[in-house]
Amino acid sequence: LIYNKYSTLADAEWRCDSLYVSINLTDLPFQKGDRILSIDGIDASSWRDSIKNYLPESTREGKYIHTANYVFSSYVDTVRNLCLCRDDSIFKVKVELSSEGMQRISQYNKETRKSENRRIMDSPKDKKEYFTLLSLSGFTDEDTEEFILKYNKVKNCQCIILNLLNNFGGLVKNMEKIAALFVKQPYQAESLITPSDNSFKGKLYVMTGPNTFSAAEHLASILKESGSAVLVGKETAGDFGTTPLTFCTSHGTYFCIGFGKPKKTFKGQPREGKGVKPHIRIKENTALSNDFNTVRATYYLAMNDILEAKRDSIKKKERLE
């Protein structure tokens, strides 16, 4: 069933079996990194177990992880009473949820994306970049057009880090346009994807996690199976095997179902009920948010590649001399 949520500008995540605030853009007196001990009087682990089976994710780990999405959102409640811990202090906060919360979150995400667009598009033409980070938040026509403009600006970098950590999917036809920019060899998906004329020639890292859904998982799977990228992060959500259809009843209630037999990848891997596993899995750290932990590790890998390439270049030059 599809309902509107009550929510606020905050988020939480599980780290090492404990629940932490990962984002707070409200004026309330809790902050990123605070540990959440209980929600509405129920300890965090018991609260998680009470709702995990109602979540739509197809994997056990996906259900477990995504319970955190409902700490600061609800389909029925407009208030959350939280008990939190910071260092040696324990305190309680009443959080009001609003029906306009999702619109405010969407606006914040758009502003974040515009900031990255300006960073890339306004960079000097003669500036030499060794590696860059490209975020892709979805596969709408607007998302795809913006991404291709950014890609054309940085396609000559030695290394690109593609951020799919919070990509909830979208149009498959647009996903395939993005895939053609990065595949090193033809790949048979719903249609044959071949490298475009200006496809990327350098090293590609793709950051994935449990918030990598649908068409974004499909893209990660294509880049992994075609040998075009190194995936870093966590396993994806495991929901890109069926086609969803949305219906509306005569009472105005919307619901979504998948139809058709779940598909498999070109190499025979299931696309439903099993996520795409990264080449390099990032271990959780209670002191760092999961996304920051993944970004930090991927930056380290990219820098290491660049340094190795420089060493090889110096050695080759010395041999020639």
Image (cartoon, helix red, strand yellow):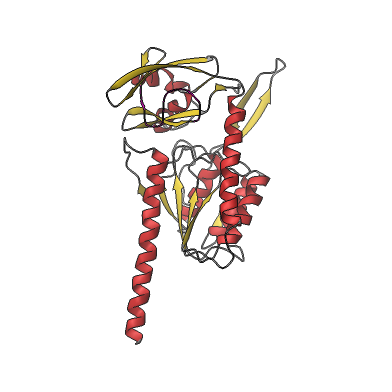
Q: Is residue 29 magenta?
A: yes
Q: Which residues are magenta?
A: 25-36
- Indicate the position of residue 297 as horizontal and vertical percent values: 36, 50
Labels in figure, total: 0
- In the picture, measured across the screen, residue 137 lies left or right of residue 33, that is right
Question: Residue at left 57%, top 31%?
Answer: 105
189, 85: nearer the viewer: 85
Which image quadrant is residue 83 in? top left
Residue found at the very far bottom of the displayed protein: 321
- Indicate the position of residue 101 as horizontal and vertical percent values: 58, 25
- Indicate the position of residue 15 as horizontal and vertical percent values: 34, 33
Classify 295 as above or below 196: above
- Can residue 257 be seen by looking at this rendering? no
Question: Residue at left 59%, top 53%?
Answer: 178
Q: Is residue 234 magenta?
A: no
Classify 297 as above or below 14: below
- In the picture, measured across the screen, residue 175 lies left or right of residue 91, that is right
